[in-house]
Amino acid sequence: MVVILSLTGILITAVWLYMRQAKFGKDPRGPHLARIAHSPNFRKGAFQNLSETPALTEGHNYFSIIYENYFKNKSRQYPKDEIPAIKTDLKNLPIHSNILVWFGHSSYYLQVDGKRILVDPVFSGNASPLPGTVKSFLGTDRYSAADLPDIDYLFITHDHYDHVDYETL
């Protein structure tokens, strides 16, 4: 019994320490929280969508989602072959060329009117805080942060791990 309690305590402590890493963020405080509180979307202590935004699409429930994601045949969810890609030397592109380079999923680089824009950079090869759990598809892992020129604007569309890669940032 002592061994089980000790192992449980060690596991709880390990999870607690892991969850305190910077990549998991923290609740806003002080001036940051005050600025957030002035948003028209911030009501009753939390952000609210201004328009109706259902959590699930019509005809689905949480059980059907769990079944589809964990028990249904997923052979068509992942590409069978590597996604064809040509790696471009981004640092040597003419600055006034308008260019779009898709890195995979939500990540892309835009060059428009002499401005360099990076959106949702995920270059770690993993779209999850747990290494090895949500790997990028073959062919979408050609670039790294070192391949990028100096960026004028960085856009993060929302704070999901497949859009915000702490290792890349």
Image (cartoon, rainbow, N blue to C red):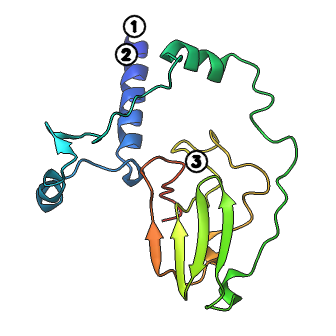
Residue 149, relative to residue 141: is it above or below? below
How far apart marks 1 and 3 lie (CA) works out to 38 Å
Please give the residue where the numbered disc 3 appears in the rendered image: 127
Tell me what residue is drawn at x 39 percent, y 47 percent: 24
How far apart marks 2 and 3 lie (CA) works out to 33 Å
169 with respect to 66 (left or right): left
Front position among marks 1 and 3: 3
Q: Secondary structure at mark 2?
A: helix
Query: Label 2 is placed on what type of residue?
Result: Leu
Residue 22, relative to residue 78: is it above or below? below
**Mark 3 neighbour class, 10 Å CA radius: few under 14, some 14 to 19, many 20 or more:** many
Front position among marks 2 and 3: 3
Q: Quadrant of residue 36?
A: bottom left
Front residue (pair 101, 31): 101
Please give the residue where the numbered disc 1 appears in the rendered image: 1
Residue 80, relative to residue 97: is it above or below? above
Residue 56, relative to residue 159: is it above or below? above
Q: Earlier in the sequence, mark 1 or mark 3?
A: 1
**Mark 2 neighbour class, 10 Å CA radius: few under 14, some 14 to 19, many 20 or more:** few
Q: In the image, residue 150 lies at what x, y percent? A: 53, 84
Query: Label 3 is placed on what type of residue?
Result: Ala
Asked if the residues shown at circle 2 and circle 3 are in contact, with their CB atoms under 8 angstroms apart, the answer is: no
**Mark 1 neighbour class, 10 Å CA radius: few under 14, some 14 to 19, many 20 or more:** few
Q: Secondary structure at mark 3?
A: loop
35 with respect to 103 (left or right): left
- Using the image, tell me which numbered label, if any, was put on residue 140: none
Query: Label 1 is placed on what type of residue?
Result: Met
Counting labels gives: 3
Tell me what residue is drawn at x 57 percent, y 18 percent: 66
- Using the image, tell me which numbered label, if any, was put on residue 5: 2
Q: In the image, residue 101 lies at what x, y percent? A: 68, 70
